[in-house]
Structure formats: structure tokens, C-alpha cells
Image: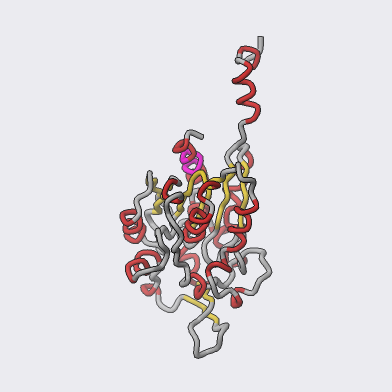
């Protein structure tokens, strides 16, 4: 007699209808859905459902980043995607770097659709950028490396810059110093100017009652030169998640140690008994 024949009918039905977790992966500023390519392959090969979002003006989205001036506009592709899901479907949101702001907003707006929120070397601020301390904790300070940004002034030279991207000669040293050269080369070809002015408007005033019920995981990157470990620690202390994992990687663990990151993402599912 086969293994399935030994199961009670109710157990067979339960196995038959159980769906694999659906991971929705959100990139950081200047990135795109492409940065998750290794994680996506690992997930799909293991039977998980995965969606990689391109925020407005990022990845293959055709919008001009200089035209993206508000965070709500920048994050609209993610919010539209979550809104389109059936009411009874729940997802696991994963945000990298500034993508942490994106998944926080989505959790606030669609808490009942979010099974778990995972922050990977990410900006994790309960209310977004409300105070000087929020900025100190959540905004990268790369001044030690010198003049590292190429900026654009979409509103005119007398106005604040609208977009920025790390200059190519600094990208590997800052964001990918422990990653394979082929991945930092790929990134250099695909990174786009990010809407820094829009990110400054990421301030969340929605009710947190339902959102606070969504469990959170933080994956801390120990050799991060973008969102430094002490910044990550401050955000973890300010809004403690259920669990913190650590990785001995740079700011881009999806390149520098994708197998371990994949394992931690799958392990996180156990928080909700998945």
C-alpha cells in the first residue's frame, strides 16, 4: 500500500490543497527585480512561488526616475500588485535596503494579505522618515568614501537633486565587496538612478493595529558598508522584530551568499507554522 493510501481522507485533502508560500521580493534603490535572480532560481527549483517587483523607474519599468517625486508613486507597482491578490491569499514580503520602506508601507495598507515581512539589510522604520533619528538610522552615510554619487536635478539646478546612483568606480567597493565579480559587473550594467527625493517622503501615518500583527524578521549583514551594522542594530532596537538572523556578507547577500539567504528565508516561514 502506498504512503498516500495510509493517510486519512482529510489528510490527503489537506496535502492536495496546500499551496507553497508565495514570496514577493522587493529591491533597494537603484536596483530592480533582476538583483534577485539567484534567489528566484533557488526558490522556483524548490517549488516556491516567487514574484520579483520592479518599482517605478527601476528595473525594466520604463518610467523616468527623475519624474518620480513621491514615495507613494515610486511604490505604486508593489501596492498595485498586493491589491490585485485575492482576499484569501497571503504572501511573504521580502525587502532589501530601501525596499524595507516599501514592504512596511504595503504591510500597513494590506496587513491581512501579508503573512510575514522579512527585512534584508533593510531600512526598517515603523513610521518611515519622521525624525532626525530615523534619518540617521535608515539613510546610508557614504561620506567616508568621498564623492560617490552621480546626481540629477530633475526639478532644476536650484532645487534638491531628484535622483542619485553610486558612481561605477565605487559600486563594488561599497555594495558588492564580498560578491562575485560577475555579479558586481552585472549590477554595474543594470543599476539605474534612484529617486532619492521620493524616498524622503516615505512617512507612514496609517493605523498600525493590523500591521503590528504581521510578524517580522530582520536579516542583519555583518560587513555592510551601505546600511552599516550599527544602523541596523538601532532600527532593530527601535522596532524589534520577532527574530534576527545574521549573515557574514556585504550589503548584497543575494549575490555574496545566495544559498544561505535562501535558507534563512525558508526558515523564516516556520514563524507562522508554514
Colour mode? secondary structure
| Quadrant in which residue 250 is drawn | bottom left
Residue nearest the viewer, comparing 123 with 184: 123
Placement of 192 over or under 113, stated as above or below: below
Quick check: can you spot residue 252?
Answer: no
Residue extent of the magenta highlight? 263-268
Identify the main secondary structure in magenta.
helix
Q: In x, y percent, where is residue 64?
A: 64, 74
Decide if residue 118 is on the left or right side of residue 135: right
Taking the spot 60% from the left edge, 41% from the top edge, the residue there is: 88
The residue under the point 58% across, 50% down is 24
Reply above or below: 132 against 209. below
Which quadrant of the figure contains the N terminus? top right
Q: Is residue 88 magenta?
A: no
Number of numbered callouts drawn: 0
Residue 266 forms part of the magenta stretch? yes
In the drawing, does residue 189 fall left or right of residue 177?
Answer: right
Query: Which of 49/166 is in front?
Result: 49
At x 49% / y 40%, what residue is drawn?
A: 263
Seen at 48% across and 33% down, the residue is 273
In the picture, measured across the screen, residue 138 lies left or right of residue 107, that is: left
Residue 230 percent across, percent down from the top left: 32, 60
Q: Residue furthest top?
A: 1
Q: Quadrant of residue 27?
A: bottom right
Residue 102 position within the rendered picture, expressed as x and y whole percent measured from the top left: 51, 60
Can you see residue 108?
A: yes
Q: Position of residue 54 (x, y in %)?
A: 62, 60
Residue 72 vertical placement versus 113 (above, below): below
Amino acid at each position: 500500500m502506498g504512503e498516500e493510501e495510509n493517510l486519512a481522507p482529510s489528510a490527503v485533502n489537506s496535502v492536495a490543497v496546500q499551496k507553497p508560500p508565495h514570496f514577493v521580493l522587493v529591491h533597494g534603490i537603484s536596483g530592480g527585480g533582476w538583483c534577485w535572480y539567484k534567489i528566484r532560481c533557488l526558490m522556483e527549483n524548490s517549488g516556491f512561488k516567487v514574484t520579483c517587483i520592479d518599482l517605478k523607474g527601476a528595473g525594466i519599468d520604463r518610467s523616468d526616475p527623475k519624474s518620480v517625486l513621491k514615495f507613494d508613486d515610486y511604490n505604486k507597482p508593489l501596492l498595485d500588485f498586493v491589491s490585485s491578490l485575492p482576499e484569501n491569499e497571503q504572501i511573504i514580503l521580502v525587502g532589501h535596503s530601501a525596499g524595507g520602506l516599501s514592504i512596511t508601507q504595503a504591510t500597513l495598507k494590506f496587513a491581512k494579505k501579508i503573512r510575514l515581512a522579512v527585512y534584508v539589510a533593510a531600512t526598517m522604520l515603523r513610521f518611515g522618515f519622521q525624525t532626525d533619528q530615523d534619518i540617521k538610522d535608515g539613510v546610508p552615510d557614504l561620506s567616508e568614501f568621498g564623492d560617490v554619487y552621480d546626481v540629477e536635478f530633475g526639478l532644476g539646478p536650484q532645487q534638491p537633486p531628484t535622483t542619485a546612483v553610486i558612481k561605477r568606480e565605487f559600486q563594488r567597493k561599497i555594495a558588492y565587496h564580498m560578491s562575485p565579480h560577475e555579479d558586481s559587473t552585472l549590477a554595474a550594467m543594470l543599476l539605474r538612478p534612484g529617486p532619492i527625493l521620493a524616498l524622503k517622503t516615505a512617512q507612514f501615518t496609517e493605523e498600525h493595529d493590523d500591521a503590528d500583527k504581521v510578524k517580522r524578521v530582520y536579516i542583519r549583514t555583518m560587513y555592510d558598508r551601505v546600511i552599516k551594522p550599527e544602523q541596523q542594530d538601532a532600527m532593530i532596537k527601535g522596532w524589534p522584530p520577532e527574530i534576527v538572523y545574521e549573515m557574514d556578507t556585504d550589503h548584497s547577500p543575494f549575490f555574496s551568499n545566495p544559498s544561505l539567504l535562501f535558507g534563512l528565508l525558508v526558515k523564516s516561514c516556520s514563524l507562522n507554522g508554514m
